[in-house]
Image: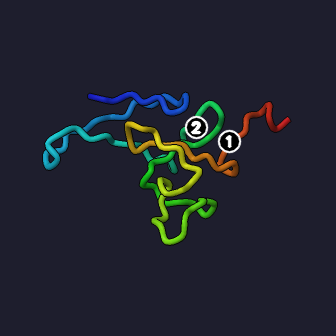
Amino acid sequence: MKHKRYDVEGAVLDIPLQWNERAGKYLEQYPDFEETPVYTPEGFPLRLTCDDACPDAVLPDNIYRECGSCQLFRLHSESLLGVCGHPAHRQTTEEETL
């Protein structure tokens, strides 16, 4: 199966590609990050720009409620992937909690 590898702030993902007849090209099949979270080495979660924004999102007035509109979302330049930069969503390491 074809895949595309992304390095998003140190989190490496192999995203499967599936042929889409209608589009006439291979499209990325992103995982469900709610179901199976992926974090950067610094503990920040990966999200898709089109994911619904969380209640903590920092959004301009009258804008779409999606992660890509949040001021704390860091978009990866080559995909729909990005990193949620909100401190409340950061996964802390065992060393940090001691």
Left or right of 76: which side holds 22? left
Residue 1 in view in this figure: no
Vertical arrangement, residue 6 with respect to residue 18, above or below: above
Mark 1 closeness class: few <14, some 14–19, many ≥20 residues within 10 Å: some
Q: Position of residue 22 (x, y in %)?
A: 14, 49
Tag 1 residue = 91
Residue 87 in view in this figure: yes
Tag 2 residue = 39
Q: Residue at x 59, y 50 (%)?
A: 72
- Asked if marks 2 and 1 touch (Cβ < 8 Å), the reply is yes
Q: Residue furthest bottom?
A: 62
Vertical arrangement, residue 69 with respect to residue 89, above or below: below
The N terminus appears in which quarter of the rendering?
Answer: top left
Does label 2 or label 1 sit earlier along the sequence? 2
Q: Position of residue 93 (x, y in %)?
A: 73, 34
Query: Is disc 1 placed on a helix, strand or loop?
Result: loop
